[in-house]
Image: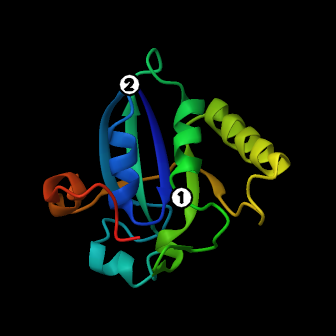
């Protein structure tokens, strides 16, 4: 198994998108990229922790490649909006790829360069590419939030 970590706005919808990809064995929503140790959802929502709402994805590389996960990441959010997705605003909703090794970093940077060159997006991609650090699991009620409620996506 391998691990990938992505932030793309509200983690409920991001998790739901990755959960259904063949080869993804588990998803966990949580907080990463900030300075506060063991933050709560309430703290992260203030924007003062530096953390992003993120999804940690465990996957089987024999069934799905990291590049395929990157493609899903870019298809499921707008990587050109700084610190926001839909109606959600703040650094906790930023677009970021937290890489776990040099290969993931290279693949992330290559994907961004290819998307920029393609012209698919009319504005520059603002997705951060950062080394993975501590990942703090969100409160249990956030795990598979949309699936528990029978919803297919977030409110936007």
In front: 38, or 124? 124
For residue 93, side relative to residue 128 (left or right): left
Q: Which mark is residue 77?
A: 1
Residue that appears at 59% across and 39% down: 71
Q: Quadrant of residue 49?
A: bottom left
**Relative horizontal placement of residue 148, taking residue 71 as reference (left or right):** left
Name the secondary structure under disc 1: loop
Tell me what residue is drawn at x 46 percent, y 14 percent: 62
Q: Nearer the viewer, residue 150 or 41?
A: 150
Report the residue at 68% width, 35% height from top: 107
Q: Residue 30 appears at what percent x and percent y?
A: 34, 58
Q: Residue furthest top?
A: 62
Left or right of residue 58, residue 68 in this image: right
Q: Nearer the viewer, mark 1 or mark 2?
A: 1
> Mark 2, residues whose alpha carbon is within 10 Å: few (<14), some, or many (≥20)?
some
Which quadrant holds the N terminus?
Answer: top left
Q: Residue furthest right?
A: 117
User: Residue 95: x, y in percent?
Assistant: 57, 61
Residue 46: where, in percent of width, then height? Answer: 39, 85
Secondary structure, mark 2, is: loop
Q: Nearer the viewer, residue 90 or 40?
A: 90
Which label is found at residue 23? 2
Q: Is residue 16 above or below residue 59?
A: below
């Amino acid at each position: 198994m391998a691990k990938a970590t992505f932030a793309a706005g509200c983690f409920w919808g991001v998790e739901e998108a990755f959960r259904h990809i063949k080869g993804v064995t588990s998803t966990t929503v949580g907080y990463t990229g900030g300075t506060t140790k063991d933050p709560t959802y309430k703290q992260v929502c203030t924007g003062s922790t530096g953390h992003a709402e993120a999804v940690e994805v465990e996957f089987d590389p024999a069934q799905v490649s990291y590049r395929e996960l990157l493609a899903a990441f870019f298809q499921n959010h707008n990587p050109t909006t700084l610190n926001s997705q839909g109606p959600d605003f703040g650094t906790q909703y930023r677009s970021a790829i937290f890489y776990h090794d040099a290969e993931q970093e290279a693949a992330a940077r290559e994907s961004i360069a290819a998307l920029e060159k393609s012209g698919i997006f009319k504005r520059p991609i603002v997705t951060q590419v950062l080394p993975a650090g501590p990942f703090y699991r969100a409160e249990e009620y956030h795990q598979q939030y949309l699936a528990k409620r029978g919803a297919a996506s977030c409110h936007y």
